[in-house]
Image (cartoon, rainbow, N blue to C red):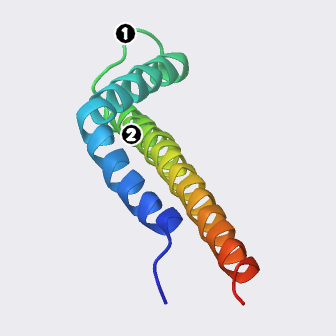
Amino acid sequence: MKTSFAKKGLYVGTGAGLILFVLFGLLPGSLLGGAAGINIAGWLFGQPVESALLSRIIVFLFMLIGTLVSGVVIVTGVSVIGWATGWMIDARTHEKVAKTDTFAAAHKR
């Protein structure tokens, strides 16, 4: 069984999404999550945030959540773009094959 272009596009899109995430999503995701964590810890324990264990855990968890959300959005988005591109190539390829098969069947005597 042949592998379709949609599946290949999905794999290429996933690889490209992981590379883009490492280059453009890892640092901003952790930065924005950390900023949100500092704000949450500030609301819970008062400003300025002390370096207590619980406030550090809150900041760490929000940094982790920010990084994970960034990764999911970037990798999923680029994977869907790769899959859609492969699907369109598959549709065009099957359309051309169907036309040539119909042409050959019509002119076969």
Q: Residue pushed farthest front?
A: 109
Q: Which residue is mark 2?
A: 67
In-front residue for pair 11/44: 11
Q: Position of residue 71 (x, y in %)?
A: 41, 44
**Which quadrant would residue 52 be assigned to in this image?**
top left
**Which quadrant would residue 37 be assigned to in this image?**
top left
Tell me what residue is drawn at x 54 percent, y 17 percent.
43
Q: Residue pushed farthest right?
A: 106
Determine whether the residue tagged by mark 2 lies in a helix, strand or loop. helix
Determine whether the residue tagged by mark 1 lies in a helix, strand or loop. loop
Residue type beneath disc 1: Pro
Q: Position of residue 47 (x, y in %)?
A: 43, 9
Q: Which residue is mark 1?
A: 48
**Which quadrant would residue 68 be assigned to in this image?**
top left
User: Which of the two discs, 1 and 2, labels the residue nearer the N terminus?
Assistant: 1
In-front residue for pair 6/96: 96
Q: Position of residue 75 (x, y in %)?
A: 43, 47
Q: Position of residue 22 (x, y in %)?
A: 25, 41
Q: Is residue 23 left or right of residue 67?
A: left
In-front residue for pair 2/32: 2
Q: Is residue 25 above or below residue 90?
A: above
